[in-house]
Amino acid sequence: MSADGSPLTDLAGYRVYFGTTSPLSKASSSWVPVDGGTTFTFTDLELGTTYFAITAVDIAGNESDFSNEGSKTVL
């Protein structure tokens, strides 16, 4: 659903941003595309804490703001 409550009709996919410092930024973080689905599995995370945030991308390439940031710590 769009921020204004209207249905999404042009959603192309998502980007999962990740990095080892918080807060993440689009300019300094890596990302992976998630096209045609709603799941993605990271494998082989390095030791320490990795931060994650998600954006939605429409068919024109417009990108939403970041979701709330989450993290995973590997010991």
Image (cartoon, helix red, strand yellow):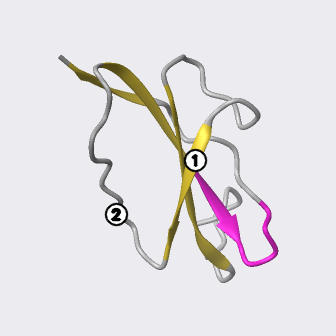
Part of the protein shown in magenta: 55-62
Image: 7 above or below 4: below
The amino acid type of the residue labelled 2 equals: Thr
Please state which amino acid type lies under the numbered disc 1: Trp
Q: Residue 63's x, y, as percent? A: 74, 57
Residue 57 lies in what quarter of the image?
bottom right
Q: Residue at 31% across / 35% down in the picture?
A: 45
- Packing grade of label 2 (10 A; few <14, some 14-19, many >=20) is few
Does residue 48 lie above or below 26 as drawn?
A: above
Residue 27 drawn above or below residue 63: above
Q: Circle 1 sits on which residue?
A: 31
Q: How many marks?
A: 2
Q: Which mark is residue 39?
A: 2
- Dot 1 alpha-carbon crowd within 10 angstroms: few under 14, some 14 to 19, many 20 or more: some
State the image coordinates of residue 16 (x, y, percent, origin top left).
Answer: 51, 49
Residue at the left extreme of this rendering: 75
Q: Where is residue 50, by image quadrant?
A: top left
Which structural element holds mark 2?
loop
**Place of residue 11 in the rendered image (x, y in percent of width and height, measured from the top left):** 63, 75
What's the distance in space between the residues labelled 1 and 2, CA to CA? 14 Å
Q: In this view of the protein, which residue sits in the foreground, 68 or 16?
A: 16
Which quadrant is the C terminus positioned in?
top left
Residue 27: give x, y in percent of width and height. 76, 34
Left/right placement of residue 13 relative to residue 38 reads right
First reached walking from the N terminus: tag 1 or tag 2? 1
